[in-house]
Amino acid sequence: MSVWPRAGFLATDDWLPALPVLLALRRRLAAIGFHTTAALPLPGNVLDLPLDVANARAFVRGRQNLFHHSALAGAYRRVLGHQNPEAVALHELLTLNRMLPRARVAELLSPRLLDELVDHGVFSEDEGIVESNIVAAVSGGRVYLADAPHLRDDPDYVYLGRSSFSPAGYLASIGWRPPRHSARAPRRMLDLGCGAGPAAVAAGAAGVEHVIGTDIVERCLRYARLNAALNGVDTTEFRYSDVLSAVEGDFDLIVSNAPCVWEELQQATFATGGADFGTALPVRMIREALGRLRPSGLMYVVMTAPIVDGDDYVVEAMRRACREHSVDVCIHPELAEYEVEQRSVLRRHKISSFIRYGVVIEFADRFSVSVGSSFDAMRYRTYGVRSRATRAAAALVRA
């Protein structure tokens, strides 16, 4: 009987031998239309709660919920599964971290490719059951890999999720050029805290001449280099750096998906932004990066911050980070985080909402901070949905 590896794939820096096997996996995913699964809503919607008794009980008791077991998410996948069963089956294995029988995985990938993936530690096999040590996600026609969720207790766990693609999505929406200087093609881009590298890789694929990604977790840098090679991008460079300590020069574009989860709410040991409800590290990153942003440049930061007793921590964080510069800071709410999974923790700290933001920073005539007009509407919807879900879940449990 084999033993599941604790460290998973990429435990060492020697990932090149596995590259041909992963390229073969990528080709297979393309051949079966794996990109179609990108349209599937990921588990985690608050409306999943009333459809799953176990999640409802955990919610009412203030415990963390296992949304990936929700009935609603499964229903979505079954609909797409009628159209593309192979892609959805691999979505279960590679995105949702479900175990599958060896015979089924061999049918989907071929016995030889399966054996090679097991040999390189990409998959684990135990008594005829296969589990993936990687998660695969599709964005912009490219496939990105990172650690599977079952490895999240590892101190070097590399996360890849919805927020990972927010910087590249925003920059793609503006044509990879700062809106105020759209005629000028950006030459240099910096991805601070690059993680598995989706923003840096996407920038290189979009034609940005020189892209640097930095992180203080070596395992993140390994995944970033692997994802660049996997997607045929050779214009990116990845370095170990504490913020900008190992980076020289100025940049046209600076992005960061800041590790800004407040410590008591964190779901992986690396994902903490320090003091001030996790905003301390993003503030430091922005403050240091502004000194390297060219006058015609743009900075985009994804960060998470709470509303405590009606005070918006993101606004105060931006004032601390940018007040010494003449910049225009536009804050855009993206998603309410932890409203359900950590309800009791939020209440204990008088937090009414914990929100993920996209923050756009450009040089201007004077310092200003503005919050997107959708903020109040989004907050109202969040409270309304949370209240309805609470009542529905409580009624379900009592029944």
Image (cartoon, helix red, strand yellow):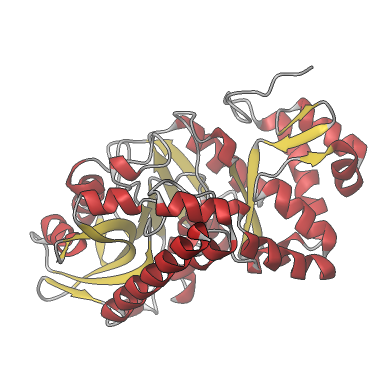
Residue 272 location, quadrant = top left
Residue 371 lies, in percent from the top left, at 23, 75
Q: Is residue 203 visible?
A: no
Residue 323 lies, in percent from the top left, at 9, 61
Towards the viewer: 120 or 265: 265
Question: Does 209 appear above or below 114?
Answer: below
Tell whether 372 sits left or right of 53: left
Residue 176 lies, in percent from the top left, at 45, 70
Q: Which residue occupies 59% across, 52% down?
A: 68
Residue 179 location, quadrant = bottom left
Q: Is residue 22 visible?
A: yes
Q: Which residue occupies 33% across, 59% down?
A: 301
Towards the viewer: 376 or 351: 351
Question: Does 392 appear above or below 189?
Answer: below
Residue 89 location, quadrant = bottom right
Q: Which residue occupies 49% across, 37% down?
A: 221
Tell whether 331 sits left or right of 341: left
Q: Which residue occupies 32% across, 56% down?
A: 303
Towards the viewer: 267 or 242: 267
Tell whether 292 sits left or right of 176: left
Towards the viewer: 121 or 184: 121
Residue 94 lies, in percent from the top left, at 69, 47
Tell whether 103 sits left or right of 282: right
Instruction: Give the mark count.
Output: 0
Quadrant assignment for the N terminus: top right
Question: Does 367 appear above or below 337?
Answer: below
